[in-house]
Image (tube, helix red, strand yellow):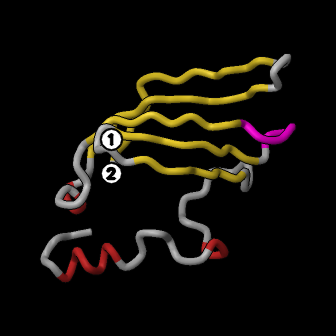
Amino acid sequence: MTSRSYFADFWLDSDEQLRKLGYCYTSSPSISVAERSQPHDGTIALEIIGNPVEKLHGIYWTTRKTTGEVTLRFRCREKLDEYPSDLGDHPMKGRAETIAVQGLQP
């Protein structure tokens, strides 16, 4: 899956103690997931929590008529090249193997 943001903005209001980040994105699936994941656009609105920031929490909705809740926690300043093993199994673990068995490459 490849996603690209095409609009982003912060809502900052110290009187209301409001700190949010919102963005719109477009997402195109790779061939291996195209059967179960259609191209779509979406929007997310995240509350910025902590000072310094420790977490982002909010909701998203898409043109596929899906919605959900997202929580992102600060982990470290370094860029990670792999999914950290101490977080447990990756949410998509097992799905790639199922696709490969069906004759597609993950």
* Residue type of the residue flagged with mark 1: Ser
The answer to which of marks 1 and 2 sits earlier in the sequence is 2
User: Mark 1–mark 2 contact, CB under 8 Å?
Assistant: yes
Task: Name the magenta segment's main secondary structure.
Answer: loop
Q: Foreground residue, 23 or 31?
A: 23
Label 2 secondary element: loop
**Image point (73%, 20%), residue name:** 12
| Residue of label 1 | 27
Q: Is residue 78 left or right of residue 100?
A: right
The magenta span reads 48-53
**Image point (65%, 45%), residue name:** 57
Q: Quadrant of residue 53?
A: top right
Q: What percent of the width, then of the height, locates residue 2?
A: 34, 45
Residue 51 part of the magenta segment = yes
* Residue type of the residue flagged with mark 2: Met
Label 1 secondary element: strand
Q: Is residue 67 left or right of residue 26?
A: right
Count of labels shown?
2
Note whether 61 is above or below 37 in the view shown: above
Q: Which mark is residue 1?
A: 2
Label 2 environment density (alpha carbons within 10 Å; few <14, some 14–19, many ≥20): few
Residue 72 part of the magenta segment = no
**Image point (16%, 71%), residue name:** 104
The quadrant in which the C terminus is found is bottom left
